[in-house]
Image: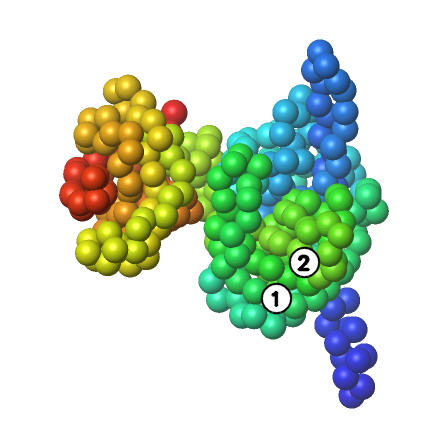
Amino acid sequence: MNLLRALSDEVHAVVERVSPALLHVRALTDSRRSRGLASGSGVIVTPDGFALTNSHVVAGATAVEVTLGDGKTVIADLVGDDPVTDLAVLRVTTGERTPHLQLADSNRLRVGEYVIAVGAPFGLTRTVTAGIVSALGRTLDGPAGRPIEGVVQTDAPLNPGNSGGPLVSADGEVVGINTAVVYQAQGLSFAVPSSTAAHVLSEVLAHGRVRRARLGIGATEVLVPSRVAREQGLTAPKGVGVESVEKDSPAAAAGLTKGDVLVGLGGRPITSMPDLHRALGRDAIDIEAPLEVLRGGKRLTLSVKPALVR
């Protein structure tokens, strides 16, 4: 069989399989200062109509309208929003079983694997682009000021309006939620991995939001003198410097002070802000953990119990 024809047939089959679960998302914002309409994409991921899109598409929305794969337009409920991962959960009610796609295990993705992006760039619904996974485990600046970890990089072309749409595998399963492109560059597109999306979905459905832990500090990345790093057995000459400590916070209770440098938490080395954010996930809430700090060039161990972010 002609290889190009075989590839074309496979891509067409995947698109036909995923299209019924696609959404064109329009979010109305209405404030005293401005009124606007944001446009993006989404995908239904459960048979009872829960869908994923980007947080930045629906942020501040007073109403969300979605157009389904069959062309029907309905009002969607915004169930939860997580700017940290740039994901949001919608509920689409149609009165019948809703076509949906499975969230795949993105940890099984391979660099070079063929992927397909489907969405509504510039309002052009069911637009299909394709490419390969260019890299895995990227870190992307999120809209909330915290990094999004484990991001999938692909060369599938994306445009404004693709945001929130699915990145799917050759099996037609969702491996990522498209979130960003690098403008004035070619072939640099990014998707939040489906493993992160699955976590956000479960947290929002169970708790209305994604739970995370906090120390209660203002902090910044700092360099540690090489001599001090070597003498104190650090994995790298870097850490997170404490600039301020909130009153009555877990950090205050642990005895952290301005000028301390965090170099470890719960047995994990801390060399950057992303390291600290990773260590302060859901599993760290209300769990006593060793906190390694440098103070006056000496390494000491404190005990801290990170609290739930309110």
Please report the residue visible at 34 percent of the width from the left and 27 percent of the height from the top: 244
How many numbered marks have been drawn onto this rendered protein structure?
2
- Could you say which is closer to the camera, residue 25 or residue 262? 262
* Residue type indicated by callout 1: Ser
Mark 1 crowd level (few <14, some 14–19, many ≥20, 10 Å Cα): some
Residue 103 picture quarter: bottom right
Residue 95 vs residue 253: left or right?
Answer: right
Residue holding disc 1: 134
Residue 161 vs residue 201: left or right?
Answer: right
Residue 59 location in percent, x, y? 62, 29
Q: What secondary structure is found at the residue carrying circle 1?
A: strand
| Residue 266 seen anywhere in this rendered image of the structure | yes
Residue holding disc 2: 188
Residue 62 vs residue 266: left or right?
Answer: right
* Residue type indicated by callout 2: Leu
Residue 75 location in percent, x, y? 70, 29
Residue 191 vs residue 256: left or right?
Answer: right
**Pointers 2 and 1 in contact (C-beta within 8 Å):** yes
Residue 5, placed above or below residue 150 = below
Residue 131 location in percent, x, y? 70, 66
Give the Cα distance between marks 2 and 1.
9 Å
Please report the residue visible at 35 percent of the width from the left and 30 percent of the height from the top: 243
Please report the residue visible at 57 percent of the width from the left and 58 percent of the height from the top: 152
- Could you say which is closer to the camera, residue 99 or residue 136? 136
Instruction: Pick the quarter of the image with the C terminus.
Output: top left
Which numbered disc, 2 or 1, marks the residue that appears first in the sequence?
1
Please report the residue visible at 38 percent of the width from the left and 35 percent of the height from the top: 219
Residue 189 picture quarter: bottom right
Residue 196 location in percent, x, y? 48, 49
Residue 45 disc label: none
